[in-house]
Amino acid sequence: MLSLKRVPCFQINLKNVSEFWPCLLRSLQNAHFIAVDFVSTLLSLHFFTLISQEFSGIGDKNNFKISNIEDRYKALVEIAKSRAIVSVGLSFFRYNGKNANDGREMNYSVENYDILVFCVDEYVNEKEATEFLANHGFDFELQKSCGLPFYKGNDKKNDEFDSYSLRLLIIEMIQRKIPIVFHNGFADLIFLYQNFYCQLPNNLQTFLCDLKEMFSKGIYDTKYIAESEDRSIASFLEYTYYGRQLLNMERKFQDKWYVNIEFDTLDLNSPYSQIKDLSCVFLSKKPEGVKVCKNYSYHGWCVKGTSCPNSHNIHLILHEKIERKSKKAKQNINKVKKFYEDNKLCEENDEKNDEAKEKTFDPSANPMNVNSGIHSSGFDAFMTGYCFAVYIALYGGDKVDAKTKFTPTNIGLKRFHNSLYLTGKDIPLKVNASSYSRVSQNHKTKIEKIKKGDFINKQPNKNDNKAEDNV
């Protein structure tokens, strides 16, 4: 079904991790690609560049727009060492093939997880980031009391946190050898490496050599794809997600490849599953007297926050975009609207779906993200993965089937393979090994242990029945 009114996300912490760890491993083993997002004490990392211009306490704001990429990397390394991740979002996408009754429909099964983590090392808490997350429902008390503990940097010989560890999960991801997807992934990868893998190398090229070997099937950045191909007014995650969702629904009525997402019924009814409405809202007309905040519509961020007199509603922003489309494009969108309204009526007759929260447009409230209520890395990871799935349909739909290996060529995304978005740059950062650089010693030592299987016995409740290698 095209509507995404009930998207589930499992919230994992110390209280339920032993129950969910086997499910997490099974999701990983079955996935064709994984989308990743973090929330840190520097806020959600795909906001890092713009936020750095507004938040105090993180050093010179120009560090994030340094022209020399090597110097920019070094600035981010220092930030990653002094801040910590508080939540890990993982979204596992398994491709199930094409619908026999609709040859243009590409079906995916998706499982989303939001894992609370707690760093036992000292780290800096940004006041503004803490306030933002708290105002958007993030529970810091739960994170401190029930977050999965971890330390940063290199592995310790006597690791007291080796059960249900994010370090072990990252090792599983490396061993699984499947594509990893981020949105604005440069900072995410730096934080992932320092928080859950080992000590960051001193120079950028060594770091890129390490990444190339860690994630051998490729790293993708949906922000880079959006910037280089969509050429739209904005590329922040929320705008990209709802824009790709609208495009996906248009493609259905144009008899083109499109994506259909399915969630397990158990996921929707689990007491540990948070349900969120992530479907498009179609406005019949723009409310009178309401203006869209231009800064938010371009960047997904506004320094005035909830005190801004203009609207931050993403659906109103998209409504204005639709109004600028051609007559033919509007006709296609009207078909989408009718389909969506018909599905909505069907859902309203379903008691279970009545429990889902409906979106409303309230221009007087003007929250920074009117839809979310709770800032969740799990849902952000899903939005990232959904965008990637739509891009596969857009560029590689005719090449992909249920038995296809998700190589860059087979999914039609070769030109985006191992390319990370860089703020202020016209070209991406390529994750490639250089003939002038070698991997770091820290990484070399760890990857050799991974290849030897030294971490296998540490993995709790490991499912020995591996899924078919689909990558």
Image (cartoon, grey):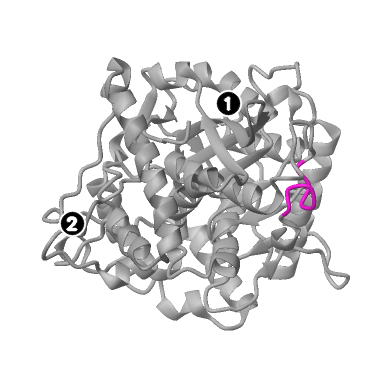
> Which numbered disc, 2 or 1, marks the residue that appears first in the sequence?
1
Q: Position of residue 246 (x, y in %)?
A: 44, 50
Residue 149 vertical placement versus 208 (above, below): above
Name the residue located 50 percent from the left edge and 78 percent from the top edge.
Answer: 65
Write down the residue under mark 1: 24
In the image, 378 versus 211, the foreground residue is 378
Residue 81 vertical placement versus 57 (above, below): above
The crowding category of the residue bearing disc 2, from other C-alpha atoms within 10 Å (few below 14, some 14 to 19, many at least 20), is: some
Residue 471 vertical placement versus 296 (above, below): above
Q: Is residue 239 found inside the magenta-colored segment of the image?
A: no
Name the residue located 26 percent from the left edge and 46 percent from the top edge.
Answer: 136
Name the residue located 31 percent from the left edge and 64 percent from the top edge.
Answer: 320
- Cα separation, mark 2 vs mark 1, equals 36 Å
Query: Residue 366: which disc?
Result: 2
In the image, 348 versus 272, the foreground residue is 348
The crowding category of the residue bearing disc 1, from other C-alpha atoms within 10 Å (few below 14, some 14 to 19, many at least 20), is: some
- Taking 238 as reference, is 430 left or right? right
In the image, 448 versus 48, the foreground residue is 48
Name the residue located 58 percent from the left edge and 32 percent from the top edge.
Answer: 165
Image quadrant containing the C terminus: top right
Magenta segment boundaries in residue numbering: 406-412
Q: Position of residue 239 (x, y in %)?
A: 41, 57
Q: Position of residue 47 (x, y in %)?
A: 42, 61
Task: Name the amino acid, label 2.
Answer: Asn
Secondary structure predominantly adopted by residues drawn in magenta: loop
